[in-house]
Image (spheres, rainbow, N blue to C red):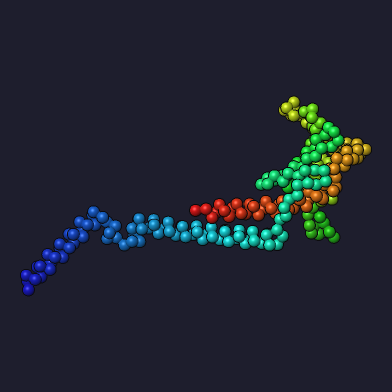
């Protein structure tokens, strides 16, 4: 019996020695996985990846829903390329468009129009119920001699408002040119004559109405394209 007990004790001591030796060589083999640094890093990376995937999945779901809603509610129309005597360049992906035309034998007219860039409230019975949207226009009239007559305008839904005008001399422009007084400071008769000058060249209320309808469609088109671009980027692996 004493011999059997001594044999068991020797076996226990041998096992302890083997475990001690192995632990020194590779401690992670005998440490619970939750206390294993490598296992912990792997677990954290997995959780982070799952959270990232869920977050991106939620963004994609919202984008798809919004795109579908915009397309079903009132899908954008194909932009027109002509308006009266103007040729219209939509400039996809940009915040402005360009209209061009000839007037008479010598004048080249170019109109740069922004998308909606401002608004003012409309008050009804003392309550602001809506807004009137604003579009900035830069009317450039040149006669091929290097100089151009530029007229800054605001296009409101119901008409054109001149804000400033000056002669642009291209490369001859000084560093700090004098651009003249504010338009409203000019003589009333001169103001009326300048509005008639623009009217004759098609810069009028009819153009303002067209631009507001055009920009409403462009705003929707660019918004949908933007959402589709963001969605495509997030979908990339």
Left or right: residue 226 compared with residue 211:
left
Q: Residue at x 15, y 62 (%)?
A: 14
The percent coordinates of residue 78 (x first, y second) are 72, 52
The percent coordinates of residue 213 (x first, y second) are 78, 52
Of residues 126 and 215, which is closer to you in this image? Answer: 215
Q: How many labels sit on residues?
A: 0
Q: Is residue 107 visible?
A: yes
Q: Residue at x 12, y 68 (%)?
A: 8
Which quadrant does the N terminus fall into?
bottom left
The percent coordinates of residue 146 (x first, y second) are 77, 28
Of residues 127 and 90, which is closer to you in this image? Answer: 90
Above or below, comparing residue 54 to residue 157 in the picture? below
Q: Is residue 178 visible?
A: no
Above or below, comparing residue 59 to residue 111 in the picture? below
Q: Residue at x 72, y 55 (%)?
A: 77
The percent coordinates of residue 103 (x first, y second) are 84, 37
Of residues 22 and 1, which is closer to you in this image? Answer: 22
Left or right: residue 202 compared with residue 177:
right
Q: Which residue ends up furthest to the right in the rendered image?
A: 189
Quarter of the rendering containing residue 227? bottom right
Q: Which residue ends up furthest to the bottom in the rendered image?
A: 1
Q: Residue at x 79, y 27 (%)?
A: 145
Left or right: residue 92 compared with residue 167:
left
């Amino acid at each position: 019996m004493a011999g059997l007990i001594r044999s068991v004790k020797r076996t226990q001591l041998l096992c302890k020695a083997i475990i001690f030796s192995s632990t020194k060589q590779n401690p992670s083999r005998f440490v619970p996985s939750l206390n294993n640094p490598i296992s912990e890093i792997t677990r954290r990376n997995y959780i982070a990846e799952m959270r990232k995937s869920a977050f991106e999945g939620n963004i994609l779901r919202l984008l798809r829903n919004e795109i579908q809603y915009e397309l079903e509610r009132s899908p954008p129309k194909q932009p027109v390329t002509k308006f009266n005597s103007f040729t219209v360049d939509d400039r996809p992906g940009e915040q402005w468009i360009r209209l061009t035309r000839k007037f008479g034998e010598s004048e080249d007219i170019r109109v740069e129009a922004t998308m909606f860039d401002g608004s003012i409230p409309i008050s009804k019975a003392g309550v602001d119920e809506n807004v009137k949207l604003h579009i900035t226009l830069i009317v450039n009239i040149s006669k091929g001699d290097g100089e151009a007559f530029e007229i800054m305008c605001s296009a409101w839904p119901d008409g054109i408002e001149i804000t400033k005008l000056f002669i642009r001399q291209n490369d001859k422009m000084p560093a700090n040119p004098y651009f003249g007084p504010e338009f409203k400071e000019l003589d009333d008769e001169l103001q009326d004559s300048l509005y008639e000058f623009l009217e004759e060249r098609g810069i009028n209320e009819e153009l303002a109405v067209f631009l507001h309808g055009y920009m409403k469609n462009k705003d929707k088109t660019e918004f949908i394209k933007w959402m589709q671009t963001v969605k495509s980027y997030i979908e990339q692996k």
